[in-house]
């Protein structure tokens, strides 16, 4: 269960950024960019799944997550937690435990045969659901998961991610338009600050990353990626 | 004939979402083009292979370029056979693409 402590938001963000760097979840590579699911070229990549292998870190992150959800949303605002396939599932399970709530998980696609289930677990009409994923980029996957939940008659009112890119201004608006409030622990800006403080990367790398974070679409277009974000 | 799929991919940076769209579009066309069903099914399977491999996984720009080149070659060979080839050419292209798909992720 949740230890009922509510650390300062900035302490949470800095601590999570340090954790992500400590477990080598953060990759900066300007010379050979990554291609995101959307087609955006990027010098940064984060693998939040690495967190699941570090029990002390994941435990602290889940406590942080519970404190953010309780403080920002309330203590009695959900009837269930839903994990998005696949990386969201372990985080949803641990967070559901902290929040003392039932858990389900949502497949990216229904099986297409048999029960044709897209939701696994018990979810009832009218239930308010907290959707959990490891990270949020442009929010595209969350909209799809929320649609799947809505087909059961339940509704996703809030979504939680350990990490939020924080560089696409439309993301919170897009999620709000779909009836979801976004909650998260850290962003690329927190990572950048800690990376600078710790001198983890060369000045050139940091400068390139900063250029991307400031103008991601322009950086993408200049490095072979898409030049406009999909609607 | 099948080159529209390549345009879709190129316009969207060879991204996972673009391959996913191609996989769905190729499957959808089978209903209206039963004479091309086998080729469309293989194109859909090839696009889905990419989605399964890289969804949630890091995709470097080099790997994306390499994958796009491989996919383009598969589609081009099917396109050529089904646009101007004989029945034997079509069968040969189908078998070659199916073999490539099986061996690629083996």
Image (spheres, rainbow, N blue to C red):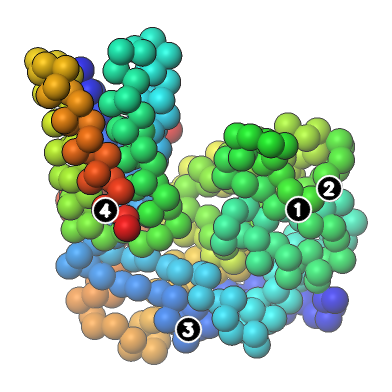
Viewer-nearest of discs 1 and 3: 1
Seen from the viewer's position, the closer of residues A115 and A26 is A115
Where residue B73 appears, as percent x and y from the top left, is: 14, 38
SS for callout 4: helix
Task: Give me the residue at 51% from left, 75% from top.
Answer: A50
* Tag 1 secondary structure: strand
Disc sitting over residue A23 in the figure: 3
- Please name the residue that numbered disc 4 is placed on: B104
Question: Mark 2 sits on what residue?
Answer: A122
> Distance of mark 1 from mark 3, alpha carbons?
28 Å
Looking at the picture, tell me which residue is in the foreground, B49 or A48: B49
Whether residue A182 is visible here, answered yes or no, is no
Of badges 3 and 4, nearer the viewer stands: 4
Front: mark 4 or 2: 4
Alpha-carbon span between mark 4 and mark 1: 35 Å
Chain at tag 3: A
Q: Chain of mark 4?
A: B
Q: Is residue B50 left or right of residue A157?
A: left
The residues bearing labels 4 and 2 have C-alpha atoms spaced at a distance of 39 Å
């Amino acid at each position: 269960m949740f230890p009922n402590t509510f650390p300062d938001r900035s302490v949470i963000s800095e601590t999570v950024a340090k954790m992500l760097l400590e477990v080598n979840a953060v990759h900066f590579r300007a010379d050979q960019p990554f291609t995101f699911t959307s087609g955006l070229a990027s010098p940064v990549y984060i693998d939040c799944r690495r967190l699941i292998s570090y029990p002390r870190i994941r435990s602290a992150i889940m406590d942080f997550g519970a404190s953010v959800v309780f403080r920002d949303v309330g203590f009695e605002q959900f009837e269930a937690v839903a994990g998005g396939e696949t990386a969201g599932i372990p985080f949803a399970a641990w967070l559901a435990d902290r929040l003392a709530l039932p858990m389900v998980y949502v497949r990216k696609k229904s099986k297409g045969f048999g029960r044709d289930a897209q939701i696994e677990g018990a979810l009832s009409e009218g239930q308010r659901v907290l959707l959990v994923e490891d990270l949020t980029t442009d929010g595209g996957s969350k909209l799809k998961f929320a649609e799947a939940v809505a087909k059961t008659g339940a509704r996703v009112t809030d979504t939680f991610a350990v990490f939020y890119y924080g560089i696409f201004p439309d993301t919170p608006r897009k999620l709000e338009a779909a009836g979801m409030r976004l909650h998260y622990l850290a962003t690329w800006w927190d990572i950048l600050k800690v990376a600078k403080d710790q001198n983890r990367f060369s000045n050139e790398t940091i400068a390139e990353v900063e250029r991307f974070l400031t103008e991601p679409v322009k950086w993408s277009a200049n490095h072979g990626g898409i030049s406009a974000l999909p609607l | 004939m099948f080159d529209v799929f390549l345009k879709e991919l190129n316009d969207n940076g060879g991204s996972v979402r673009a391959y996913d769209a191609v996989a769905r579009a190729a499957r959808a066309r089978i209903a209206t083009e039963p004479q091309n069903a086998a080729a469309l099914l293989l194109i859909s399977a090839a696009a889905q292979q990419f989605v399964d491999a890289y969804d949630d996984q890091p995709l470097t720009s080099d790997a994306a370029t390499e994958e796009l080149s491989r996919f383009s070659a598969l589609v081009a060979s099917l396109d050529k056979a089904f646009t101007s080839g004989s029945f034997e050419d079509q069968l040969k292209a189908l078998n070659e693409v199916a073999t490539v798909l099986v061996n690629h992720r083996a």
